[in-house]
Amino acid sequence: MPSLFAPACFLIFTLIGAAAAAGKVPAVIVFGDSSVDAGNNNQISTMLKSNFQPYGRDFYGGRPTGRFSNGRIPPDFISEAFGLRPFVPAYLDPQYNISDFAAGVCFASAGTGFDSSTSDVLNVIPLWKEVEYYKEYQNKLKAYVGDTKAHDIISESLYIISLGTNDFLENYYTLPSTRSKYTIDQFQDHILGLAEKFVKDIYELGARKMSLTGLPPMGCLPLERTTNFVNGNGGGCMDGYNNVALHFNGKMDGLVKKLNGEMPGIRVVFTNPYGIFMEIIRKPSNFGFEVASVACCATGMFEMGYLCDQLNPFTCSDANKYVLWDSFHPTEKTSRIIADYVVKHSLREFL
């Protein structure tokens, strides 16, 4: 990594030590889609799986966990930055139980959106089901540590909420029925309304410290660039998609301010990955990358999930040279940079 990141890395390590000493956040609890799914989709019937090689080849023990990455994903690095475990386990993973989940748990499911119809398209766990699992988790937690301790964990934990991309790419831009019902501006407001409802739902269940994540530059993802015939080494993107992401993120920032002003005891921060992700894509060499136009897996243009076969001769040998792991998801190295950035700029007040 270039020397310009040395101060940032030093800061993160300092924050890790401070967080461990203070213990202000006892657990990281995750809701969302494949950007933060730690493997819940391994346990359901869906084509959106990644529990096979080459996924996870750079994870602990080279084990494919169901994370859509060659290694760890942003919540794992965020958990580590808060002095907790260096990964957040999936709630449906049978090798973990409530003794593990008391220090952090992931309910996220690849393909999920704020809109339940998005989950229907991809045959995955809808967001309301993630909330049902969370309620179940709370009951298990109370039985494990007692009501008082469980209340403390629930109210002091950091809740990472990361979804919305599928609502646009797999719902609005894919389904004519959705586009006939909403203009793009109306659809953004629809998704924001569902995001607001979700925050209020988990607030009523005891959540207080939340990170609401915005959209990435979704027009630069290899899958979207390939299907829309856009070329170039990170320079060619679907500007229309990116403009929607920017507009939506502006609205979400406004929603966060509104929630903080209306709901007693809540603290929501807007975590915006757009700028840092776009900077990595536009100037990959500044971050130690060599390739931003295609992903590491297979041809790097459209493959993800089962199309990322470990025997594919095109899969790269060193994922650290690539910004993207598959056509939709970043490499572990990219996730680390983004996580470090959001801890420093958005989440540091919780440390």
Image (cartoon, rainbow, N blue to C red):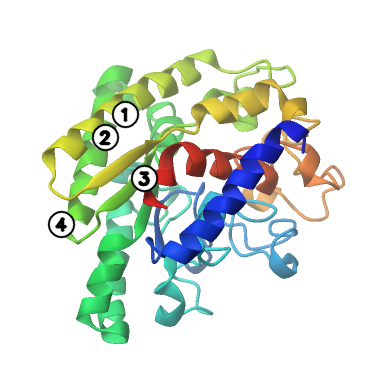
Q: Which residue is label 1 attached to?
A: 253
Q: Position of residue 155 (x, y in %)?
A: 25, 62
Q: Which residue is label 3 attached to?
A: 211
Q: Position of residue 302 (x, y in %)?
A: 67, 35
**Taking 317 as reference, is 27 above or below it?**
below
Packing grade of label 2 (10 A; few <14, some 14-19, many >=20) is many
**Taking 185 as reference, is 154 above or below it?**
below
Q: Where is residue 85 in the image (x, y as percent from the top left)?
A: 54, 67
Q: Which amino acid type corresponds to the residue marked 1 in the rendered image? A: Asp
Q: Which residue is label 2 attached to?
A: 256
Q: Which residue is drawn at 69% across and 36% down?
A: 5
Q: Which residue is label 4 attached to?
A: 204
The mark that comes first in sequence, 1 or 3, is: 3
Q: Where is residue 292 in the image (x, y as percent from the top left)?
A: 72, 29
**Quadrant of residue 142 within the rendered picture:** bottom left
48 left or right, relative to 56? left
Q: What element carries label 3?
A: strand
Q: Which of marks 3 and 4 is in front?
A: 3
Q: Is mark 2 on a helix, strand or loop?
A: helix
Packing grade of label 1 (10 A; few <14, some 14-19, many >=20) is some
Disc 1 and disc 3: Cα gap in Å?
A: 11 Å
The mark that comes first in sequence, 1 or 4, is: 4
